[in-house]
Amino acid sequence: MGSGLAAQVVAYLIAMTVGPETPLVAWLTVAGIAGTLAGTLLLGATRHGRLSRTAAVAATLLLLIPLVGFGAVLLMGPDRIDGLVLGLPARAAVVLLGVGLLPVLIFPLAYAIDARDAPLDAEALAALRAECAQVMPRGDR
């Protein structure tokens, strides 16, 4: 996650000093977005200091899908018109279907597999209920 944030910071600095039209700004932004998303998933999916294989695969996909999708759009260029894909221009289809929809289909499956393989034990469930009771308003209990 730190490298993704660093890439975004460098992209902003280059955009403010050299200019936003510099191709490096777009590529650093893409790398920063992908790295930050994957890093955030890794932080949230770590349980007892360990990362499951399913979460590692999901994090890798979350790193690669935006890199490949946004990278393909950047390589297509602004003037390229390839026709329609499911009624959308090709560049919009890559972003909406590839970068937007594909993770929505993958990550619930990864979460379900991970939850099936490592369910909460009685102690963890009791700790979760106690924590929820602390944050819940008094009238809702």
Image (tube, helix red, strand yellow):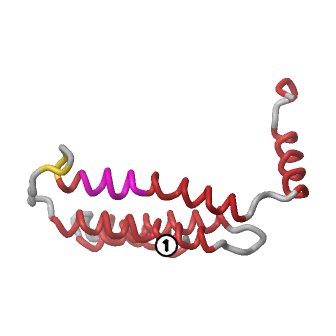
Q: Position of residue 126 (x, y in %)?
A: 90, 50
Verify whether residue 58 appears in magenta.
no
Which quarter of the image is occupied by the C terminus? Answer: top right
Q: In the figure, 87 relative to 52: above or below?
A: above
Number of marks: 1
The answer to whether 4 appears left or right of 93 in the picture is: right
Which quarter of the image is occupied by the N terminus? Answer: bottom right
* Magenta highlight: main SS: helix
> Which range of residues does the magenta coloring cover?
93-102
Secondary structure found at label 1: helix
Q: Position of residue 53 (x, y in %)?
A: 61, 74
Disc 1 marks a residue whose amino acid type is Thr
The residue sitting at 30% across, 64% down in the picture is 70
The residue sitting at 36% across, 67% down in the picture is 30
Q: Position of residue 116 (x, y in %)?
A: 69, 59
The answer to whether 109 appears left or right of 74 in the picture is: right
The residue sitting at 90% across, 57% down in the picture is 123
Verify whether residue 98 appears in magenta.
yes
Q: Which residue is mark 1?
A: 60
The residue sitting at 23% across, 51% down in the picture is 92
Residue 109 falls in image quadrant = bottom right
Q: Position of residue 136 (x, y in %)?
A: 81, 35
Residue at the outermost top position: 139
Q: In the figure, 121 relative to 10: above or below?
A: above
Between 132 and 17, which is closer to the camera in this rendering?
132
Between 17 and 93, which is closer to the camera in this rendering?
93
